[in-house]
Amino acid sequence: MSEVYQKLEKIVEGKHISKDLYVRHAYSRNVDLVLQGVPDIVIRPKDAQEVSEIMKIANEENIPVTPRGGGDCEFGGSKPIGNGGIVLDTKRMNKVINLDQDNLIVTVEAGISWGKLNDFLCNFGLYTGCMGPGSGMTAAVGGGISHHSVGGGGCAKYGACTNQLVSLEVVLPTGDIINTGSQANKYSKYPFNRFGNGPDLAGLFCGDNGIFGVKTQVSLQVFPKPPYAAYKTFQLPRKEREVSAKIMTEIRQKGIEVYDLMFLMDLIVRLGCQEGMFPFWENLKKKRGVIFYTIEANSEVELDEKVKQLDEIMVNNKTEELGQEIQDGNIAKWHYAEQGHWQFYHNLWGIYPSMQPLTAECFSPIGLYPNVLNDIDQWDMEHNEDMQKIFNITKIRPIAGSGPVLLIDGNNVEITCGFTSFWNYYNGEVHDIIEETNLMLWKSLLERVTKHGCQWYMMGDYMSRLMVDIGAYSEEYYNLMKSIKQVLDPKMILSRGKFNFWGEK
Amino acid sequence: MSELKHLKSQWEAVMSCMGCGDCGYAIRPAVDRYLTCPVKEAKGGEGFEIYFSRGRMNVLKSLLLGQIPLSKELADFVYQCSECGNCTEVCHMSQNEYIVLNTSKWIDHVKVWEALRQDLIEAGFAPLDKHGKLIDYMNDVSMRNPYGEEEANKFAWISEFPEIKEEGDLILFGGCTMPLRQVDTLKSMMKIFKAAGREIAMSKNEWCCGSIALRIGDQNSLIDIIKHNVEIFKEMGAQTIFTACAGCYRTWKKDYPELLGEELPFKVKHITEILTEMLNNNEIPFKPVEGSETVTWHDPCHLGRHMNLYEIPRDAILKIPGLKFKEMKRNRNNSWCCGAGGGVKSEFPDLALDISTERIKEAIDTGAQILTTSCPFCIGNFSDAYKEMEPKDQEKINIIDIIDLIAGKI
């Protein structure tokens, strides 16, 4: 490895590469508590050329490479699967390259965060529409494209962030650098359109979970930020899951444009109030779920009309508005006007010490999600005995259920589902039984949800392999993916282990 | 393998870090959050994740799980942290009167870093070279200060002020940095008190407050120091002790009662609290004002994030005649550290200067002609960075302790 290290050191300056034990452990985890992989080397290239040279050496030496942007994957996607290999930290590539104000297209280096990009754009009255994933103020644009991310705001109106994609610069696993869309024509001066010049090869890299190439430059459509916005929160009646789904369907059927719409189930409201997290909901007589929306408009008239139409739907569905101000329980206003944070509702992360979400992010048709949530309750009861094993140590039972259900483009929602459990290190001792039970329960629940037909988008280490393990892909589809991988990455260098291609490790 | 006694006491904090990375990268303009970790930013391209909180927490998880050992090499990383506490602020960013994150009850990053430093010291991997010298000096009976100077030097300035009493209600704890490095500011303070007709007392038997040892993680001789300092002020009949040093203030007001396990028998105030009282009572006879200057305030970490003392210095500034006030982009709990704290200035001076330079540039961006604060470490570090700046930038701003700012207008 020291010979490889020396070769890599020649590509980046010495201070941008490390094989230090502690640096490697710093990169060994993502946003999840049970998945860990310690790389041999961490490297921070400055541009596509350096990434290309790194990939060429990795091919020569048959060393796996895992790209890492903000490191916010909830499935261990930006750390190695197993130990070893190279973690390629893209966060040094964080510049805005060009803003084409006439054509509303911004070109950035892929390691820039959605937060930094939108901070830049707001100087011009612009935003990215979909603001990336829920962790977007930190997460990298390249990671968002690699996962079809949603959740950072705006996805009911603009859809996943890949919807805004115009063109990509990608370093292929072999080290070749390509440009997609309009930039596939080498005579094109500026990116302007994703489609044409042959098939949509950008699509190959959207949601690829980092297996087909390393994104180094991204061009996105940007949008003028409308000057008017309204935020409202409503408490749902009985049968909140079905009613919330009906509301979302009616909004889509009537063609009312909402910026964001989110359903928080009763589990979150009830437990959150019980633990003192939501003082503004303490006085709610019934701790039922809530639904809240944000809308934007270019004029007051437009805003009023949209509010009127939405309120009509809410009233007809027997919801109860919680008041205009945050202290009245209007979480929508807190969420958007004060930039609320995604963490607190992630199955109530951090509600007890050491408690963290073992969740998963998937898309589902609106009409399907009530069944999925009801089945998670059923799953919870069926696995009470296993949950009890953890309870016996922690004296607190893991929580199964869903975080927010978020309306995205089309008639789809994003569901954050799973269960929230404890680290195997609890109160001074390592408990292997917790880790074993966590992994078993996590797998079991994800398999259950997969069999409802949900579509996973942030698949990382765990979910990508689970889909293969449980035979969720049709043979033909999986073979096609495998063939593409083989052509692009014959030595399986990039994100080795994901999707279990050839069962390699 | 070390027992990790101190780190284990912080396991709830370590294991509650979910690794979102906001402590390294968060930019949230709506809550004035523009990045978080001054060390990571100053490292630039070298800014591996071990230089900010998430990466460090990952290392601590591996330590607690027994995967990796403590070492001198780890200490070299760990002490490259100014313990400014900005990571704690961003970690609980959602927290406000409407949303209460339970994690705020058990995640206090500075406590975690200090616990790790204590374990490193007990395992023999720290203190680092220069830190060790500071602590040796502090414990040396002929010095009792971390600057390696004779004890008498610390009190030499008092001879110019016979009006300083040996007993009294209001007693100054002089500390070490001001009397040994910024004595003119103490003289300015006496000018203000004299003009306002206020009497103060001071002891020539005070020892270093021990802040430097606490921040480095060496608590071996602290209880003796604390007991000595508390006793002498008790004997002087103190109702209130005050200090012009933010580090001493935090140590006296927060650490002493925690370490003693009991409340102190007198009040502890920072000089800005005393000055604000005097300004509110119109006790300070200012000269007639000619023109006006714009001033900006730097929140020292040991006053602001560590002690929640944000508004009092601002109240003071607003009462000083001839000044307009302008906030920096990052202020109060989002304030950018000066880079001197946590032992960074002594062991990693270049890092401290890089951080400081960024903060001065932020002050210049406000258009203010004066950057003021009330911490001798911040002032010292800013002054060092200022000396290295281009003359065209130096012309744009002056850096001055709030005491000197007020005294200059009397």
Image (cartoon, coloured by chain):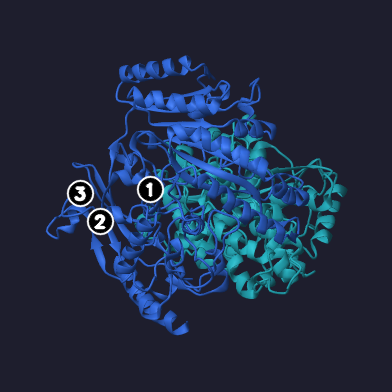
Chain colours: A blue, B cyan
Q: Secondary structure at mark 2?
A: loop
> Is residue B360 positioned above or below B135 on the image?
above
Q: Residue at x 81, y 40 (%)?
A: B239
Q: Classify mark 2: residues with Cα within 10 Å, few (<14), some (14-19) or many (20+).
A: some
Q: Amino acid at mark 1?
A: His
Q: Earlier in the sequence, mark 3 or mark 2?
A: 3
* Chain under numbered label 3: A
Q: Secondary structure at mark 3?
A: loop
Query: Which residue does the numbered mark 2 point to in the structure image?
Result: A201
Can residue B361 be spotted in the picture? Answer: yes
Residue A148 has which mark? Answer: 1
> Is residue A358 positioned above or below A311 on the image?
below
Quarter of the image for residue B94 reads top right
Give x and y (percent) for residue A427.
Answer: 75, 55
Can residue B305 be spotted in the picture? Answer: no
Q: Amino acid at mark 2?
A: Leu
Q: Earlier in the sequence, mark 3 or mark 1?
A: 1
Q: Are marks 1 and 2 on the same chain?
A: yes
> Is residue A371 positioned above or below A358 on the image?
above
Towards the viewer: B361 or A316: A316
Give x and y (percent) for residue B342.
Answer: 62, 60
Q: Residue at x 35, y 35 (%)?
A: A410
* Chain under numbered label 2: A
Query: Which residue does the numbered mark 3 point to in the structure image?
Result: A195
* Chain under numbered label 1: A
Give x and y (percent) for residue A400.
Answer: 62, 42
